[in-house]
Image (cartoon, grey):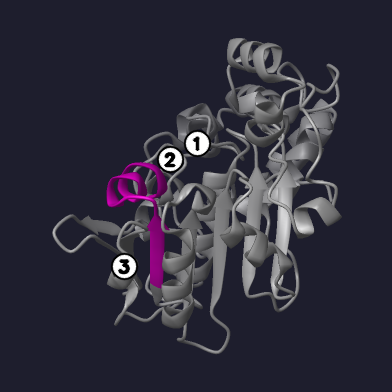
């Protein structure tokens, strides 16, 4: 399925003008915060009544952004004070510091992805995020599985589970805690490793998976980084894991994800930095909006919107390079 951003990237100038011209000022300001419009296919949750969604990919493939946006989708309602589907969320990483610095405060974390009128507040003492509508996310470390005894949740985001030293114990405790609501769900964002806990999750019939290599998100990654890591690790087992996001056994092998060494796809097989892909989209939108005078008209505004209230404008948002990228 092609994203709206993908369509815009390949649209003719007159089509872009028609699209932007058909949006109200409020819609134009809201558009940057509607992740479904900008997301890559692997960053969107599969359909169905799944319990666990595993987003498995290489370094920099956009896993963190997908996890953060999924949390947003669970806790946010139609308006800033309206309740969402989830009210109690567990954020679980290898350490509390990693949860705070990557999942919450990171460039692709929850705070960076949240519109100003829906942005949660961080309480360092309690290690919680609280949204304007009262939803709360609580931080947990995989080094302390028993800290998940007692609390209960209707949603959870688990990051880099495959590297946890106490992965089995922490995962088990989280399953006992995920008991609120009609259908509690959890998302796992991870680079694969050949570990039992990940194999077991992938074999579970209630698990769904999406996958992407590092290359899929290259519009947001330094060219020198990609050139170096593919030259050094391409064709090696480490490259298959860290760049292709392949490995982990079980369903991963069944879906062709347990392959051999990684080789870099040929040029042109993914998003292009110049005219296509998210980076190209940013250039297109910024240029068209400056031509239309929308940059000057909307810059610095903080209007509230019906669904995705936001301060600033589409150009300002894209100028920050947020698009569908992230870690």
Residue 96 in the magenta stretch? The answer is yes
Q: Is residue 242 left or right of residue 131?
A: right
Q: Residues within 10 Å of mark 3 (few under 14, many from 20)?
A: some
Q: CA distance from mark 3 to mark 1?
A: 22 Å
In this rendering, the label closer to the viewer, 2 or 1: 1
The residue positioned 78% from the left and 59% from the top of the image is: 251
Query: Do the CB atoms of the residues marked 2 and 1 lie less than 8 Å apart?
Result: yes
Q: Furthest residue to the left?
A: 125
The residue positioned 42% from the left and 34% from the top of the image is: 299
The residue positioned 53% from the left and 36% from the top of the image is: 322
Of marks 2 and 3, which one's residue comes earlier in the chain? 3
Q: Which residue is mark 3?
A: 132
Disc 2, SS: loop
Of marks 2 and 1, which one's residue comes earlier in the chain? 2
Q: Which mark is residue 317?
A: 1
Q: Position of residue 240 (x, y in %)?
A: 72, 32
């Amino acid at each position: 399925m092609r994203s709206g951003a993908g369509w815009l990237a390949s649209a003719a100038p007159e089509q872009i003008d028609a699209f932007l011209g058909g949006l109200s000022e409020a819609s134009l300001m809201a558009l940057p915060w509607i992740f479904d419009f900008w997301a890559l296919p692997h960053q969107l949750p599969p359909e169905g009544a799944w319990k666990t969604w595993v987003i498995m990919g290489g370094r920099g493939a956009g896993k963190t952004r997908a996890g953060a946006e999924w949390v947003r989708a669970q806790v946010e309602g139609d308006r800033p004070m309206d309740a969402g589907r989830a009210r109690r969320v567990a954020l679980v990483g290898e350490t509390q510091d990693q949860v705070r610095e990557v999942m919450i405060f990171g460039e692709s974390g929850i705070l960076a992805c949240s519109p100003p009128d829906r942005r949660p507040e961080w309480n360092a003492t309690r290690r919680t995020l609280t949204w304007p509508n009262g939803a709360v996310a609580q931080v947990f470390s995989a080094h302390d599985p028993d800290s998940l005894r007692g609390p209960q949740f209707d949603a959870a985001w688990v990051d880099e589970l495959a590297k946890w030293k106490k992965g089995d114990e922490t995962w088990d405790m989280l399953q006992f805690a995920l008991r609120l609501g009609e259908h509690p769900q959890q998302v796992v964002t991870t680079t694969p490793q050949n570990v039992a806990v990940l194999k077991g999750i992938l074999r579970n019939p209630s698990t769904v998976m999406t996958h992407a290599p590092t290359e899929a998100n290259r519009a947001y990654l330094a060219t020198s980084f990609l050139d170096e890591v593919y030259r050094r690790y391409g064709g090696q087992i480490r490259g298959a894991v860290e760049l292709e996001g392949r490995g982990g056994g079980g369903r991963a092998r069944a879906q062709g994800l347990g392959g051999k060494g990684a080789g870099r796809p040929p040029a042109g097989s993914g998003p292009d930095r110049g005219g296509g892909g998210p980076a190209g989209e940013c250039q297109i939108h910024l240029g068209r909006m400056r031509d239309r005078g929308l940059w000057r008209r909307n810059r610095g505004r903080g209007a509230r919107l019906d669904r995705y209230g936001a301060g600033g404008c589409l150009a300002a948002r894209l100028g920050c390079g947020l698009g569908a990228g992230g870690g």
